[in-house]
Amino acid sequence: MPTVPKGNRMIRTLTGQNSFILQQELQRIISEFVAEYTDMGLERLDGEEAEYDRIRESLESLPFLASKKLVVLRRPGVNKQFVENAERLLSDLPEMVDVVIVEPKLDKRLSYFKFLKKVTDFKEFNELESHLLVRWTVDYVKEQSGELSTTDATMLISRIGVNQQLLSNELAKLLLYNSKITKETILLLTDQTPQSSIFDLLDAALGGKTKRAIELYEEQRQQKVEPIQIIALLAWQLHALAIIKTAGDRDPATIAREAKLNPFVVRKSMGIAGRLTLTELKQLVHNVHLLDVRLKSESIDTDEAMLELIVSIGEI
């Protein structure tokens, strides 16, 4: 049975899809360690590059020119030997060695996950619920001495997506232009992500706004997004709609958690799902699948075929 490491050493695991918050926590840990022990005791290893013996040596060796050592292991789980020996390595650490294991994606069915969950200080950073993401965006701008309304924050997220790292980058650009972020500056300085555009395209087509749906498609093509990519994004959106449509009376948070979808995506898609019958959704999936096959197996005018698909969506 796994045993919790003893002594003064600290072993942490950081995991989850929210890379922004995960990196913030990692930087906090590193900064606090360096402030107390200097960077002489800091070692960083990447599981995709470092050999197992190099990882083992780093974990087993005593700190040099420092009273304590911090070993940051990024994705060591890709190293089969490390996974096989993780229990022994982490249980036999010298007391002067702390470890941070960064595993953005962990398969919860594996014993490696269960071991880390049991014997380490385990922190999982998931994507924020939609209302929390909006609140974070508004607060983040305020912390930077800027101003952003809840309505415009919601619009920004719908436009560029739910990735907090991307959001922080775009907010930095917007704040540099003007400390008061408005709808006008968001439209001026940010580009709508393909995924958000395809959601709007599908929403417009299903709402009978075929002209607007075609405009959105043409905008994507002007931005060099290929038809096959647009088909893939449509398929992803239909996958999310199918999950929502068959979720029964589950609330959005439960759907997002069980299906491993972003909560913001689920809430945003609820409106479309509510307008479609299951039969209509199946027909949509069928139409997109047929075109996907044709694009990959036939020599056809891809743009013309895509426009025909958009028109057919409006007729469902």
Image (tube, rainbow, N blue to C red):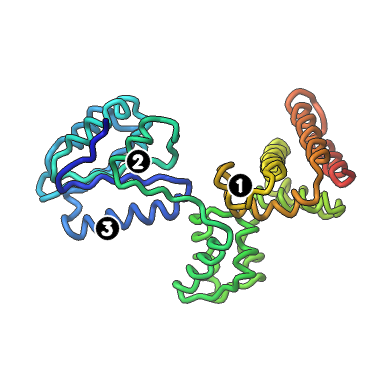
* Residue displayed at 84% across by 42% down: 307
In the image, 165: left or right of 277? left
In the displayed structure image, the side of residue 26 where residue 275 appears, left or right: right
Which kind of residue does numbered mark 3 sit on? Answer: Ser
Which is more N-terminal, label 2 or label 1? 2
Q: Is residue 285 above or below residue 15?
A: above
Judged from the image, the secondary structure of the residue bearing numbered disc 3 is helix
- N-term mark: 1 or 3: 3
Q: Which residue is mark 2?
A: 117
Q: Name the residue located 20 percent from the left edge and 37 percent from the top edge.
A: 59
Q: Quick one: label 2, few (<14), some, or many (20+) residues within 10 Å?
A: some
> Percent x, y for residue 119?
28, 40
Amino acid at circle 2: Lys
Q: Is residue 41 shown to the viewer in this render?
A: yes
Choose between 298 and 273: the one closer to the eye. Answer: 273
Q: What's the residue at 54%, 61% (across, down)? A: 133
Tell me residue 256's x, y (percent).
Answer: 58, 48
Disc 1 secondary structure class: helix
The quadrant where residue 283 appears:
top right
Residue placed under numbered mark 3 in the picture? 31
Q: How many C-alpha atoms fall within 10 Å of the one at disc 1: few (<14), some, or many (≥20)?
A: many
Quadrant position of the N terminus in the picture: top left
Report which quarter residue 285 is drawn in: top right
Q: Amino acid at mark 1?
A: Ile
User: Marks 1/3: CA distance?
Assistant: 37 Å
Q: Residue tagged by mark 1?
A: 255
If the image is split into quadrants, where does the C terminus sit? top right
Q: Position of residue 306 (x, y in %)?
A: 80, 39
Front disc: 3 or 2: 2
